[in-house]
Amino acid sequence: MEQTIHSPETYDFRKYDQIWQRVAPNLEPYPDLREPAVPAVPPLPSGGTASGAPAVPAAETLPGAEQDPCCMGTAAREELEVLEGFIEAELADRRVYQALAQRAPASARRTMRDLAAASGTAAKRLLTARYLITGACYRPAVARGRIPFGDWCSTLRERYHVEACNGMNYLRAGEETTDPCLGRLLKALGEESYRQADQLMALLERAL
């Protein structure tokens, strides 16, 4: 479906609220979906190894050890639809900034290229996270066609709101997930989106 900067619903992540609400506060991040443990080798009578060195406890017997990964594991699977939504949004943002880099005032084109690169990097990080969680590559939809723009100030205003809303939704998703590493990633992307919003606000200040 074609996305334009004049279609704010494209970037409205409220449709994912129901997904986030399904993440129960008491969700167990490490359900009993484990592979059978490898039987431990019985210790030698002396309490050591064949070489005489002290016996080292097997990893699965250490306190807190889990067969399910502590990061990007089962708990993160609850957020797959959210991740995919963020991936699609970042790729759409990159496409808009690439187009703006060709049409913006000369003094702002470098910033547009930087914003396009940042959106592309965010999409790659999210794609990598999804692969860590699932072990499968995700093929996002690619929008095509010309993107219409309004005047420069209204375009900056709309892009500011897009980035600010992205930041809010990233931080909210980072707080909702029970996976610690995914939470760190989403919060980092949220802060980056707010920095991008600040860049757009600075451009708007100079344009008014």
Image (cartoon, helix red, strand yellow):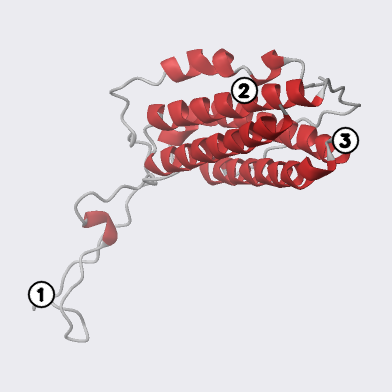
- Label 1 Cα crowd, 10 Å radius (few <14 / some 14-19 / many 20+): few
Crowdedness near tag 2: few (<14), some (14–19) or many (≥20) residues, C-alpha within 10 Å = some
Residue 3, quarter of the rendered image:
top right
Using residue 79 as the reference point, say whether residue 143 is left or right of it.
right
In the displayed structure, does residue 145 sit left or right of residue 178? Answer: right
Q: Residues within 10 Å of mark 3 (few under 14, many from 20)?
A: some
Task: Identify whether 174 is placed above or below 2.
Answer: below
Horizontal placement of 2 versus 62: left or right?
A: right
Residue at x-position 67% and y-position 29%:
89
Could you say whether the residue bearing mark 2 is in a helix, strand or loop? helix
Look at mark 1 in the image and give the residue it sits on: 47
**Where does label 2 land, which residue?**
161
Q: Estimate the spatial distance between the alpha carbons at disc 1 and disc 3, rounded to whole Å.
A: 74 Å
Query: In percent of the image, x 69 and y 34: which residue is there?
Result: 206
In the picture of the structure, the residue carrying the numbered disc 3 is 103
Disc 1 residue type?
Answer: Gly
CA distance separating discs 3 and 2: 20 Å
Q: Secondary structure at mark 3?
A: helix
Q: Answer whether labels 3 and 2 touch (C-beta < 8 Å).
A: no
Report how far apart the C-alphas of labels 1 and 2 lie in the structure. Answer: 65 Å
Tell which tag, 1 or 2, sits nearer the viewer. Answer: 2
Where 161 falls versus 37 (above or below)? above
Q: Which part of the image, by quadrant, shows the C terminus? A: top right
Counting from the top left corner in percent of width and height, residue 146 is at 91, 26
- Under mark 2, the amino acid is His
Q: Earlier in the sequence, mark 1 or mark 2?
A: 1
Q: Residue 165's x, y, as percent?
A: 56, 23
Q: Which quarter shows the N terminus?
A: top right
**Closer to us: 70 or 36:** 70
Closer to us: mark 1 or mark 3? 3
Q: Is residue 140 visible?
A: no
